[in-house]
Each structure stands twice: as C-alpha cells, then as structure tokens.
Image: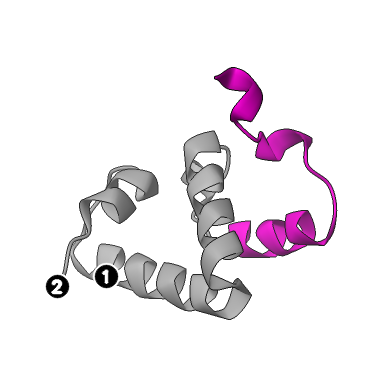
Amino acid sequence: MNAQVISIENTDGPQMLVLQRIMRMVPDRDKDDTDLKRLLAFRLMVDGENATKEFLMDRIRAMIQSSYHGRLLDWLKSDHRY
C-alpha cells in the first residue's frame, strides 16, 4: 500500500514550484505541516493554481474573521462557512 502513496517531499518539477508559491500564503505557524502541503498539492493537481489560491485566500480570510486559532488544516477540513 505504501508504494502507491506519492510523497510530495520527494517530488520535483514545475508543480513543486507552484506549491512553494502557494505555501507562501500559509501562516508561518503552519508552513511545516506536511498534511497541509499534501492537501494543497492535491487541490493544486485537481483544481489548478488560480482556483487553489482563491480557495486558500477565502478560507484564510474566513479563519481570521472568526478568530480561529487552531491549525489551518483543521479549519480547511471542517469546512466552516461564515
């Protein structure tokens, strides 16, 4: 089963550069969260760069407005709508 999992940490190429640009938008406390990177890499692969950036900015804005102080990944997974 582990042979089928693609590790983004060992991936190079243009998508990794785009992922690095997207990770600049993430708050500093969550930049080293590997699960968050994997989620954003998946969204990037499925939705593309612009849609992923819009999604992330919208969710970060909502997180700030609601005064949430937990992990960004938990916020994204919970799908809060404010």
The residue that disc 2 covers is: 82
Foreground residue among 65 and 54: 54
Is 1 above or below relative to 58?
A: above
Mark 2 vs 1: CB contact within 8 A: yes
Q: For the point 30% across and 44% down, which residue is it? A: 74
**Residue 24 image-quadrant placement:** bottom right
Residue 4's disc is none
Helix, strand or loop under label 1: helix
Find residue 23 and report its horizontal and vertical position in percent. 61, 57
Q: CA distance from mark 2 to mark 1?
A: 7 Å
Q: For the point 69% across and 64% down, which residue is it? A: 21
Is 33 above or below relative to 54?
A: above
Res 12 seen here: yes
The amino acid type, in three-letter code, at marker 1 is Ala
Helix, strand or loop under label 2: loop
Residue 62's disc is 1
Quadrant (top left/top right/bottom left/bottom right) for the C terminus:
bottom left
The amino acid type, in three-letter code, at marker 2 is Tyr
Classify residue 16 as left or right of residue 33: right
Within the magenta stretch, is there residue 20? yes
Is 36 above or below relative to 47?
A: above
* The furthest residue to the right: 13
The numbered mark, 2 or 1, whose residue comes first in the sequence reads 1
Find residue 54 and report its horizontal and vertical position in percent. 46, 78
Within the magenta stretch, is there residue 68? no
Range drawn in magenta: 1-24
